[in-house]
Amino acid sequence: MEWQVLGVGFLMARLFTIKDNASKRSVMTALWDCVGELIPSGGLDITVAKESKTRLQEQRYHAMMNDISKQVEFDGRRFISKVWKVKLKDQFEHDLIAMGTPLSKPGSVTMSIDGCRVVQIPPESKEFRKAEASDFIEFLFAFGADHSISWSDPETQSQYREYFEREIGQ
């Protein structure tokens, strides 16, 4: 069974993660016990959601976007990693919509305060679900293949070679 304590004191929250059918009963029993302990101190909010991305996934795609920012020119100029993050998330979201599988928490558009422009609000990668983060990393591998990116992280290089052989066939 896996669970984490988030926060301290009266703001304490517990995150319970069910990894497979075998762990379902033990996690639900622990959740039941937790609810029993906390209900006397007030109401509870319980949210059931697909597993969030891991910190390792987050570190991986940030490192990959940093490599891209150092190696790719767009429209005749280089952009910092922050700009590439916006551009890559936008393209990733666009591609998912085209495939009929939009992000669980998509970006949006709104009018500027003066009403003269459209403001694009990109999706937040911090809100990616685990599968979305995995798909984003695959998207970055594909982008890397198209732009001859040399990945700086040895593990990323190894996984890229596997991806390239599997997807590109070379």
Image (cartoon, rainbow, N blue to C red):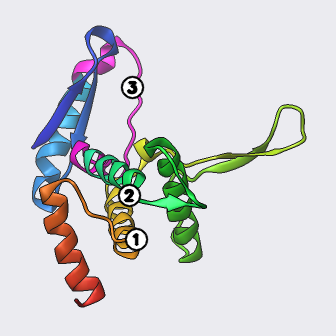
Q: Is residue 73 above or below residue 112?
A: below
Q: Residue at x 22, y 35 (%)?
A: 32
Q: Amino acid at mark 2?
A: Gln
Q: Is residue 103 visible?
A: no
Q: Amino acid at mark 3?
A: Leu
Residue furthest to the front in view is 76
Q: Is residue 7 above or below residue 147?
A: above
Q: Is residue 6 left or right of residue 105?
A: left
Q: CA distance from mark 3 to mark 1?
A: 49 Å
Q: Secondary structure at mark 3?
A: loop
Q: Earlier in the sequence, mark 2 or mark 1?
A: 2
Q: Residue at x 34, y 14 (%)?
A: 11
Q: Which is more toward the observer, 49 or 88? A: 88
From the image, tell me which residue sits under label 2.
71
Q: Which is more toward the observer, 6 or 148? A: 148
From the image, tell me which residue sits under label 1.
147
Q: Residue at x 20, y 84 (%)?
A: 165
> Dot 2: few (<14), some (14–19), or many (≥20) neighbours within 10 Å?
some
Q: Residue at x 76, y 44 (%)?
A: 110
Q: Is residue 30 above or below residue 53?
A: above
**Residue 100 percent location from the top left of the image:** 55, 75
Magenta stretch encompasses residue 17:
no
Q: Secondary structure at mark 1?
A: loop
Q: Is residue 34 visible?
A: yes
Q: Is residue 138 left or right of residue 159?
A: right
Q: CA distance from mark 2 to mark 1?
A: 9 Å
Magenta stretch encompasses residue 54:
yes
> Dot 3: few (<14), some (14–19), or many (≥20) neighbours within 10 Å?
few
Q: Which is more toward the observer, 116 or 104? A: 116
From the image, tell me which residue sits under label 3.
44
Q: Which residues are magenta?
A: 37-58
Q: Which is more toward the observer, 123 or 104? A: 123
